[in-house]
């Protein structure tokens, strides 16, 4: 009997055998990166990375989560975000489930802290800490290199009809900061901006993080402005919207490298 109790404690301490529900794409991806993807028993319809995440039972669409479906999975740990319906999260807690909520990181440093915390919950804090230390050094190296190059005027588009760009308070601002780029859309609050404002700023590079049909529509719109420096230079680029808007520390660095190559 003592042997099985000890085994159970080890499973909890080191994360093995946990039944996990992840209620956000970046949370799902981080659990996979930390070697516990096989322990996820439920996630959302937007959890598509890695491909194995698509085969896991879906329990909602991030905001609207199915409490009954989650409860039926009998999870040991539920990882959620501040986008999840707080009333449903509270209901899960009332039912006795352990729920840990992560707020949207404000910057790359915050993304790294979240990764380490998830690592701690899974018994992988040491591995997670080492991983973010490596990635932070990589970002520092990129920043040193880009500081020596030209500073391009960049418009980063994340919405269409109406037009949206990066909110003033967003970790995505760090992409442009570390790439040593000039954001032409500043002081925009939550990010809504007019087409006229963008055209007047004449960006040299336009980055688009939108899904398929919207991305094509955005490209078509910019082609109507051939005098824009970005259009003339052929520097209207698409970026993987899931990776860019919901990154792990690893995918943040991957997107940053793409942006650096696009803003030379």
Image (cartoon, rainbow, N blue to C red):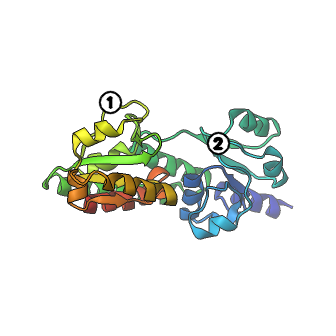
Residue name at image x 19 percent, y 55 percent: 146
**From where the camera sits, is residue 141 visible?**
no
**From where the camera sits, is residue 244 visible?**
yes
Quadrant that contains the N terminus: bottom right
Quadrant that contains the C terminus: bottom left
Q: Secondary structure at mark 1?
A: loop
* Neighbourhood count class around disc 1 (C-alpha, 10 Å): few under 14, some 14–19, many 20 upward: few
Q: Is residue 252 left or right of residue 66?
A: left
Residue bearing mark 2: 100
Residue placed most toward the observer, 66 or 70 = 66
Residue 10 in the image: state x and y as whole percent: 69, 59
Q: Is residue 84 left or right of residue 258?
A: right
Q: Earlier in the sequence, mark 1 or mark 2?
A: 2
Location of residue 89 by image quarter = top right
Residue 71 in the image: state x and y as whole percent: 82, 48
* Neighbourhood count class around disc 2 (C-alpha, 10 Å): few under 14, some 14–19, many 20 upward: some
Residue 133 in the image: state x and y as whole percent: 37, 55
Residue name at image x 56 percent, y 63 percent: 49
Which label was assigned to residue 187? 1
């Amino acid at each position: 009997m003592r042997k099985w109790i000890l085994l159970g404690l080890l499973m909890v301490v080191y994360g093995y055998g946990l039944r996990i529900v992840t209620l956000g794409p970046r949370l799902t991806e981080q659990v996979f990166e930390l070697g516990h993807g096989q322990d996820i028993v439920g996630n959302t319809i937007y959890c598509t990375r890695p491909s194995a995440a698509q085969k896991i039972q879906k329990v909602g669409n991030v905001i609207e989560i199915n409490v009954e479906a989650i409860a039926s999975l009998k999870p040991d740990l539920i990882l959620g975000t501040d986008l999840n319906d707080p009333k449903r999260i509270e209901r899960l807690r009332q039912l006795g489930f352990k729920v840990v909520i992560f707020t949207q990181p404000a910057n790359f440093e915050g993304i790294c802290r979240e990764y380490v915390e998830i690592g701690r919950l899974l018994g992988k804090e040491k591995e997670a800490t080492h991983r973010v230390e490596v990635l932070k050094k990589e970002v520092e190296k990129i920043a040193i290199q880009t500081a020596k190059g030209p500073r391009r005027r960049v418009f980063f588009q994340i919405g269409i009809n109406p037009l949206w760009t990066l909110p003033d308070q967003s970790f995505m601002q760090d992409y442009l900061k570390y790439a040593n780029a000039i954001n032409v859309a500043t002081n925009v609050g939550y990010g809504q901006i007019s087409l006229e404002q963008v055209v007047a700023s004449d960006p040299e590079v336009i980055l688009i993080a939108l899904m398929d049909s919207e991305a094509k529509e955005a490209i078509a719109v910019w082609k109507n402005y051939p005098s824009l420096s970005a259009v003339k230079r052929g520097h209207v680029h698409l970026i993987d919207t899931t990776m860019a808007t919901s990154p792990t520390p690893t995918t943040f660095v991957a997107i940053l490298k793409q942006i650096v190559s696009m803003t030379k």
